[in-house]
């Protein structure tokens, strides 16, 4: 055994013995006896809502020119939860979303190839039911701020319709989808008053399975299955909610 290896092993043994005999320091992260942020027996009622309207006239972006678009996105998600014990509760959430886009004209030009989209219309909506489990970790002793994690087990149904003008006629596709998901949504919650709290959360970790059936022009049929796993923070998926505690 060379001298360098002996020196490394000796240093590791010395550091281990020192750390083993060192006094334990309280960093303030001991959660064995956390304070009560939301007490046992409380009910949480509230939810989130989001609406966006789009209106473009002769708009251009990247390789797409002359976009005439009208559309909207709507999502409503009410929820309730019962606290089985301090800082821990179970409940349910329902989510309804609807999206519509109508493109009158749009032109795409890539490497000398020109494509045009004329009279394109799509609309879809989905409904999800979710069983939820919420855990709160208080920040400080003031009982105003806390970290929250919501675990969701969801089942969803969705429908979509697409129609566009092509070759002098109208082509249409109808699709029906089913989905199953397991998602973890961490966030930050703060009490604005004794009973009202505001929450900021993000869908960070999830497993989603989906099955889609479609029929094109009432003649051709097809099916698709997809599986997705995500572990990332998407700033576009930030959610803002209001909740009452009773």
Image: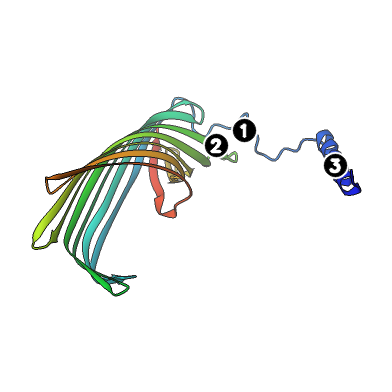
Q: Nearer the viewer, mark 2 or mark 3?
A: 3
Task: Look at the image and name its color scheme.
Answer: rainbow
Q: Which residue is mark 1?
A: 31
Q: Secondary structure at mark 2?
A: strand
- The one of 112 and 49 positioned closer to us in this rendering: 112
The x and y percentages for residue 79 are 35, 36
10 Å neighbourhood of mark 3: few (<14), some, or many (≥20)?
few
| Quarter the C terminus occupies | top left
- Residue 21 visible in the snapshot: yes
The x and y percentages for residue 115 are 23, 68
Q: CA distance from mark 2 to mark 1?
A: 8 Å
- The one of 118 and 91 positioned closer to us in this rendering: 118
- Residue 66 visible in the snapshot: no
The furthest residue to the front: 1
Q: Secondary structure at mark 1?
A: loop
Q: Which residue is mark 2?
A: 137
Mark closest to the chain's N terminus, 2 or 1: 1
- The one of 195 and 32 positioned closer to us in this rendering: 32
Q: Which residue is mark 3?
A: 9
């Amino acid at each position: 055994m060379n001298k360098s290896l002996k020196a490394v092993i000796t240093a590791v043994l010395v550091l281990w013995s020192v750390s083993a005999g060192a006094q334990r320091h309280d960093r303030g992260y001991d959660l064995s006896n956390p304070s009560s942020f939301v007490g046992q027996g409380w009910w949480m009622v509230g939810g989130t809502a989001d609406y966006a309207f789009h209106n473009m006239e002769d708009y251009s972006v990247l390789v797409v020119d002359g976009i005439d678009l009208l559309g909207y996105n709507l999502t409503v998600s009410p929820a309730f939860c019962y606290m089985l014990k301090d800082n821990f509760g179970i409940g349910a959430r329902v989510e309804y979303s609807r999206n519509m886009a109508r493109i009158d004209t749009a032109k795409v030009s890539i490497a000398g190839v020109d494509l045009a989209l004329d009279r394109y219309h799509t609309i879809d909506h989905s409904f999800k039911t979710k069983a939820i489990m919420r855990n709160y970790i208080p920040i400080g002793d003031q009982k105003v701020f806390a970290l929250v994690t919501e675990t969701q087990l969801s089942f969803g149904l969705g429908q979509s319709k697409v129609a566009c003008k092509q070759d002098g006629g109208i082509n249409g596709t109808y699709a029906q989808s089913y989905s199953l998901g397991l998602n973890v949504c961490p966030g930050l919650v703060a009490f604005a008053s004794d009973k009202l709290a505001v929450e900021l959360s993000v869908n960070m970790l999830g497993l989603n399975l989906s099955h889609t059936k479609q029929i094109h022009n009432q003649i051709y049929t097809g099916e698709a299955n997809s599986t997705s796993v995500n572990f990332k923070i998407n700033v576009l998926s930030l959610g803002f909610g209001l909740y009452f505690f009773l």
